[in-house]
Amino acid sequence: MIMPEQRRRLVTEIPGPVSRELLARRASAVARGVSNMLPVFVTDAGGGVIVDADGNSLIDFGSGIAVVSVGNAAPRVAARVTEQVSRFTHTCFMVTPYEGYVAVCEELAARTPGDHEKRSALFNSGAEAVENAVKIARHATRRQAVVAFDHAYHGRTNLTMALTAKNMPYKDKFGPFAGEVYRMPMAYPLRWPGGPDACAAQALEVVKSLIHAQVGEDNVAAVIIEPIQGEGGFVVPPDGFLPGLASFCRDNGIVFIADEIQTGFCRTGDWFACDHEGVVPDLVTTAKGIAGGLPLAAVTGRAGIMDSVHSGGLGGTYGGNPVACAAALGAIETMEAEDLAGRARRIGEIMLPRLHKLASAHPVIADVRGRGAMLAVELCRPGTLEPDPVTTSAVSAFCHRAGLVTLTCGTFGNVIRFLPPLVIGEDLLDEGLSIVEDAFASVVS
């Protein structure tokens, strides 16, 4: 593997002429419903850069939406994948099994929160993992109701759209959705009535009271929550909320599902975001960062819950594909060998002070939040909590033109999220932050 030169370089406008030609082909061949954030076509990527078809080298603050934490072509991942491809690419684990699937499940048992006996099942995508976690919880409890939260994002299948909070673009006119899904207010410090202190004091009791009054604890199979919300805006609940919610579930025989699809595998400075407060979920869903860019997902949980499902009740033709399993073992080896949880904490130490300084200079930034290398700024009309998606979009567009990949998110489209690869060089990190600062200086009047 030849690593791209680790520097930003612009040789054409963004997008350049080759990318524009490819965009024209895309328009005539790819469904309109498949969007893209930055219209450049990639030819090479690795470390902290993406190289496009015109020869531009862009700094990557997106990691393919938190997927390539180990880099786009990490040597250990590439080596294991190459070796596995030369042996076999598929048999279907449900037909003739192979060691790689078992080895990934062993790693998940060792690394997910808690020292209890665990089992795992492997799938293809985060949405598949969430859907199967709900299936398992319902089977184990013989209950039907599932509780999710405002601002949640759990996927694009029918059930996971029901769990997802945001209508456009994820749910609009795709219904009817799966039933027995109940939504609770998220512990969102910036937007909780009365502010962060009130959120810390009230949110858990409000949620517990609503579940009791509107659903009934004995009817709830599972509560599912992202320890730090992803697409909903990188919302970080106050300390104590997640442990309290897990305790409530435990006391009432409810399966507590932590959706660690975006937060997992070192992204927040721990192997899993639940580790920050010592929360031990009953089930954990993982995907994204698990396999260095190859499609793989998992549900990992307490052996008694996972094994409650009858033989044949879980699976899928491609779930735990041998090449994806090889990639996952290479990615996990990389995370361990290079201490990428520590690298994520270091990224946070570099980025947070500069983002807070940026917020002090630009009142349009209402909040700076996140943990490790999962950080965000929320933009509002100064002095209010009125979302400002127009400025958000303009800042992100400036970054794109300047050669920095940034992503937006949030229920109101007013959050810029930062998800750099955990292997990014600090010089690129600093340069990327300078571009963000220039963007705000240029866009915000």
Image (cartoon, rainbow, N blue to C red):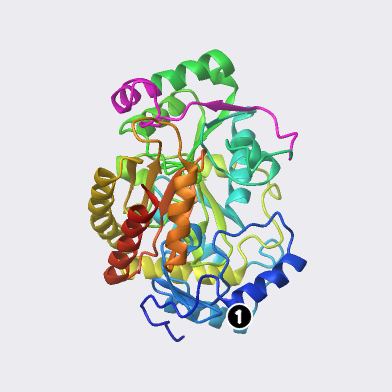
- Tell me what residue is drawn at x 49 percent, y 57 percent: 65
Looking at this view, name the residue that lies furthest to the bottom: 2
Image spot of residue 303 (x, y percent): 51, 44
Image spot of residue 144 (x, y percent): 65, 28
Q: How many marks?
A: 1
Vertical side of 264 occupied by 277: above or below:
above
Q: Secondary structure at mark 1?
A: helix
The answer to which of 295 and 85 lies nearer the viewer is: 295
Looking at this view, name the residue that lies furthest to the front: 445
Vertical side of 98 occupied by 176: above or below:
above
The answer to which of 208 and 5 lies nearer the viewer is: 5
Mark 1 Cα within 10 Å, few/some/many (few <14, many 20+)?
few
Indicate whether residue 177 is drawn in magenta.
yes
- Principal secondary structure, stretch drawn in magenta: loop
Q: Amino acid at mark 1?
A: Val
Residue 106 is left or right of residue 275, and the answer is: right
Magenta range is 174-203
The answer to which of 431 and 351 lies nearer the viewer is: 431
- Tell me what residue is drawn at x 69 percent, y 66 percent: 92
Residue 101 is left or right of residue 234, and the answer is: right
According to the picture, the residue beneath numbered tag 1 turns out to be 85
